[in-house]
Amino acid sequence: MLPVLYSFRRCPYAIRARMAICYAGVPVELREILLKNKPPSMLAVSPKGTVPVLVLPDGRVLDESCDVMCWALAVHDPDNWINPAVSREASRLIAENDGSFKTHLDHYKYSDRYPEQASAHYRAEGEAFLQALEVRLQQQSFLLGHQPGFADVAIFPFVRQFSLVDPDWFSSAPYPRLRHWLNYWLESHLFTSVMEKYPVWQDGAAARYFGCTAENN
Ligand SMILES: N[C@@H](CCC(=O)N[C@@H](CS)C(=O)NCC(=O)O)C(=O)O
C-alpha cells in the first residue's frame, strides 16, 4: 500500500509538497480534490480540511506541507536540500513566507474582497518580502546559498502566485534576480512534472499514481 496524498493542483502548499515528493522519487497515490467539495475520507483523517494531506501506510497523517516535505526528504534527499547549517534561517524565512507574506499575497490577489485599500497598497506590503529575497539573490543563486534547497522550493510557489496577479507589473518590477530565480523553478522539470493535470478524485474512485524518477529532476 502506498502513501496517499490529497492535493489540489494550484495550491502553493500542495505544490511544495508534490515537488519534494517528486524530487525524493517516492511514489504515492495522488487524490486531486476540489476545495469546495472535500472528500469525506480526507476530512475523516484531517478535519481541518486543508491540503496537502499525506496519509502513511502505518496510519500516520501529515497535514502540514512542510511536514510532508520533511517526510519525503527523510526518505531521499539526493542534492542535500536539507542543509543543517542553514536550517534555522530556512525555517525563519518560510515562517515569514507562510505568515505575513501569504496574508499580503491573499489581500493583493483577492483585493476586491478587501476594499479598505487599493490593490497597489496590498502589493506594496507584499513587496517587503520580495525585496528581502532580491537582496539575498544578489549575493547567491538561491535563497540560502549557491545550491537549491528546502527554502527555495517551499517559497517559490508563493512568489509564483504573487507574480501571476499582475504579470506585466511583475515583469518590470525592480526584482531582476528574483525573476531569474522564479524562472529557474518555473522551467524546471520538477515543477512542470508536478503540475500535470489529474482528474478530480472522489471516494471510491480508482487510484492514480504520482511519482517521479531521477530523470524527472
Ligand atoms: N499550513 C497549511 C496550509 C495549507 C492550506 O491552507 N491550504 C489551502 C489551499 S492552498 C487549503 O486547503 N485551504 C482550505 C480551503 O480553502 O478550504 C500547510 O502548510 O499545509
Image (cartoon, rainbow, N blue to C red):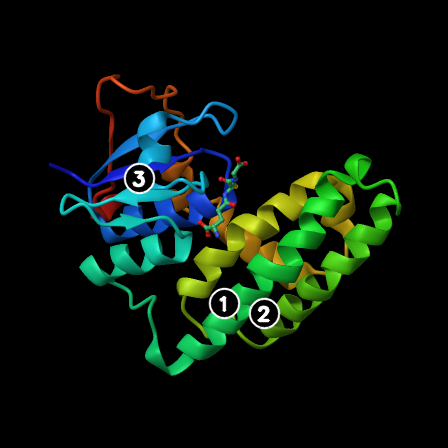
Residue type, label 3: Val
Report which residue position mark 3 lands on.
Answer: 45
Question: Residue 2, percent across and down?
Answer: 15, 38
Judged by depth in the image, the label closer to the viewer, 2 or 3, is 3
- Do labels 1 and 3 touch, CB within 8 Å? no
Q: Residues within 10 Å of mark 1 (few under 14, many from 20)?
A: some
Which residue is at the front of the view, 173 or 108? 108
Q: Residue at x 29, y 20 (%)?
A: 203
Report which residue position mark 2 lands on.
Answer: 137
Q: Is residue 217 visible?
A: no
Picture quadrant of residue 133 = bottom right
Residue type, label 1: Phe
Ligand 1 has an atom within 8 Å of the beta carbon of the residue at disc 1: no
Q: How many marks?
A: 3
What SS does tag 3 mark? helix
- Do labels 2 and 1 touch, CB within 8 Å? yes
Q: Residue at x 52, y 69 (%)?
A: 143
Q: Residues within 10 Å of mark 2 (few under 14, many from 20)?
A: many
Residue type, label 2: Leu
Pick whichever of labels 2 and 1 is earlier in the sequence: 2
Cα distance in 3D space between marks 2 and 1: 6 Å
Pick whichever of labels 1 and 3 is earlier in the sequence: 3
Vertical placement of residue 171 versus 76, above or below? above
Per the rendering, the mark at residue 142 is: 1
Cα distance in 3D space between marks 2 and 3: 40 Å
Vertical placement of residue 130 versus 104, above or below? below
Picture quadrant of residue 196 = top left
Quarter of the picture containing the N terminus is: top left
Which residue is at the front of the view, 139 or 102? 102
